[in-house]
């Protein structure tokens, strides 16, 4: 992913579990909104970026809880390791969120780039393993 590319959800990010795919699509949409707001100048754009960052963090927490509940229901053996990946991300994001809240100029951009890269990697590796596990058991 180029640093200035607007992230977009595509078929390469499908894991084959409709609820998870829909939630991932929503995460991509919020990250794209942050990126688009940051391409604009002015306080209105910065305020929109901050609002979208807050929405992204809230939705990420909701998504992780939802995904982990599905994994638990499926008796997914890698759930503890997957849960730890989620926990580590939330710790990292918490630190970056503070930078956004105090208005550090590059914080929203840094956070959106970090989350876009993390989201892509996490979906293509860890979440697709879960999708394959569910597909094998169906």
Image: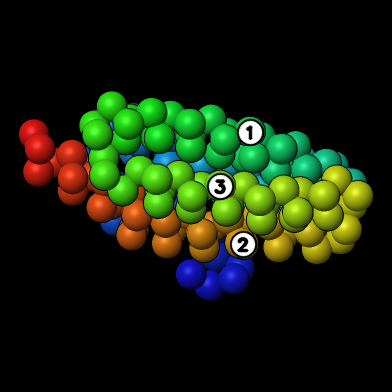
Which residue is depicted at the point 62% across and 47% down?
Answer: 90
Do the residues bearing badges 2 and 3 touch, measured as CB atoms within 8 Å?
Answer: no
Q: Nearer the viewer, mark 1 or mark 3?
A: 3
In the rendered view, does 68 fall on the left or right side of 118? left
Q: Earlier in the sequence, mark 1 or mark 2?
A: 1
Q: Earlier in the sequence, mark 2 or mark 3?
A: 3
Q: Is residue 6 visible?
A: yes
Distance of mark 2 from mark 3, alpha carbons?
Answer: 19 Å
Residue 97 is situated, as x and y percent measured from the top left of the image, at 76, 48
Distance of mark 1 from mark 2, alpha carbons?
Answer: 17 Å
Do the residues bearing badges 1 and 2 touch, measured as CB atoms within 8 Å?
Answer: no
**Residue 22's image quarter?**
top left
Q: Secondary structure at mark 2?
A: helix
Q: Kindly identify which residue carries mark 2.
A: 113
Q: Please tell me how crowded label 1 is: few (under 14), some (14-19), or many (20+) other residues with Cα within 10 Å.
A: few
Q: Earlier in the sequence, mark 1 or mark 3?
A: 1
Q: Kindly identify which residue carries mark 3.
A: 87
Is the C terminus in the top left, top right, bottom left or bottom right quadrant?
top left
Residue 131 is situated, as x and y percent measured from the top left of the image, at 23, 44
Q: Secondary structure at mark 1?
A: helix
Q: Kindly identify which residue carries mark 1.
A: 58
Q: Nearer the viewer, mark 2 or mark 3?
A: 3
Residue 129 is situated, as x and y percent measured from the top left of the image, at 25, 52
Distance of mark 1 from mark 3, alpha carbons?
Answer: 14 Å
């Amino acid at each position: 992913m180029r640093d200035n590319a607007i992230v977009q959800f595509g078929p390469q990010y499908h894991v084959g579990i409709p609820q998870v795919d829909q939630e991932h699509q929503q995460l991509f949409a919020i990250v794209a909104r942050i990126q688009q707001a940051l391409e604009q100048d002015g306080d209105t754009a910065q305020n929109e970026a901050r609002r979208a960052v807050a929405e992204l963090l809230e939705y990420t927490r909701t998504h992780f809880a939802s995904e982990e509940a599905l994994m638990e229901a499926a008796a997914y053996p890698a759930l503890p390791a997957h849960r730890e990946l989620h926990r580590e991300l939330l710790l990292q994001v918490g630190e970056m969120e503070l930078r956004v809240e105090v208005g550090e100029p590059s914080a929203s951009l840094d956070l959106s780039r970090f989350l876009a890269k993390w989201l892509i990697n996490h979906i293509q590796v860890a979440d697709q393993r879960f999708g394959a596990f569910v597909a094998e058991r169906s």
